[in-house]
Image (tube, helix red, strand yellow):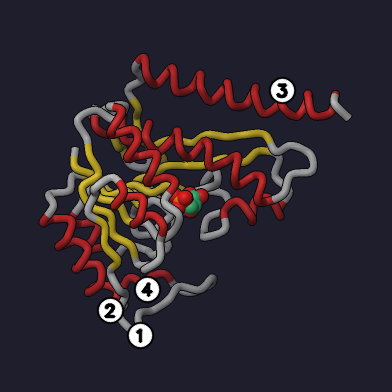
Amino acid sequence: MRIGVLASGSGSNLQSIIDSCISGYIPDSQVVLVLSNKQNAFALERAKSHNIEARFLNPPDGFLKFKRGMNIEDIMNDPLRRKYDQQIIDEFKKKEVDVVCLAGYLLFVTPKFLDEFPNAVINIHPAVLPSFKGQHGIRDAWEYGVKVIGCTTHFVDDKEDHGPIILQVSSVVLPHETSESLSKRNLKREHLIYPETLRLYQKGSLKVNGRKVEIKWDEAHFNFHQQLLELWRNDIDDYYNSRQQK
Ligand code: GRF
């Protein structure tokens, strides 16, 4: 499977995908191209250090920037956005990309993009959707006072953080946590959930049926869930031990 990645930031999710391709956890797969709308995205460096082609694509001047409350359709219809996405489509098509992963990518993709890669654009979001959509999933959840945080992988559609959910995992919110500490713990889950999503995708174990994604569970998927349970247990043990030491 040939994976194309769009990233805007540090690229830790990209790293988990690269590592899982190298280890064979995602079978017969490789990241073939990483593109970013940010020149200084560390994701580009990560890719290059694995000899993966990686490039900054400069969004054109006048490009409509999304702000909370804005109509997403205006963004989707912005001719400059469409032109920009066409550039990305062309790059991915040249590389014969089978699946596109949004990994900390801060822009929406336009309908044309989705038409070019039907049921093959996947996103990760750092909250349990449909709660806390948008750019600050963790911070918004923490400010709201949730007692469980988590993350979601989903197929991308034309609405924000909305398409059919593939996997979701959760984690307890411990006393005295900050949005930063939660974000750090949540990332550990993200680095498991994205590779597992792609492993299932590569095996043809995901079937989209309207909003529902049916998953064919195999041995590795059971193991994945055991690993998540282990993380819950470890977090609670660590907190318990830290109290004993006081
Ligand atoms: C992650 O929480 C991701 O879910 C979000 O952006 C954060 C940065 O991830 N969309 P990364 O280190 O750039 O992969």
Q: Up-down: is 147 above or below 214?
A: below
> What's the distance in space between the residues labelled 1 and 2, CA to CA?
8 Å
Lower sequence index among marks 3 and 1: 1
Name the spot of residue 129 as percent of width and height, x first.
52, 46
Q: Up-down: is 203 above or below 38?
A: above
Can you identify the residue that label 1 sits on? Answer: 62
| Pick the front one: 3 or 201 | 3
The amino acid sitting under disc 3 is Asp
The amino acid sitting under disc 4 is Ile
> What's the distance in space between the residues labelled 4 and 1, CA to CA?
12 Å
> What's the distance in space between the residues labelled 3 and 2, CA to CA?
51 Å
Can you identify the residue that label 3 sits on? Answer: 237
Q: Around disc 1, counting alpha carbons within 10 Å, would you say few (fewer than 14), some (14 to 19), or many (20 or more)? A: few
For residue 75, the mark is 4
Can you identify the residue that label 2 sits on? Answer: 80
The amino acid sitting under disc 1 is Gly
Lower sequence index among marks 1 and 2: 1
> What's the distance in space between the residues labelled 4 and 2, CA to CA?
9 Å
Lower sequence index among marks 4 and 1: 1
> What's the distance in space between the residues labelled 3 and 4, CA to CA?
46 Å
Q: Are marks 3 and 4 in contact (CB under 8 Å)?
A: no
Q: Hey, which residue is sitting farthest top in the picture?
A: 219
Please identify, in this view, whether the residue under mark 3 or under mark 1 is nearer the observer: 3
> What's the distance in space between the residues labelled 3 and 1, CA to CA?
51 Å
What SS does tag 4 mark?
helix
What SS does tag 2 mark?
helix
Please identify, in this view, whether the residue under mark 4 or under mark 1 is nearer the observer: 1
What SS does tag 3 mark?
helix
Which residue: 19% across, 37% down? Answer: 1
Picture quadrant of residue 215: top left
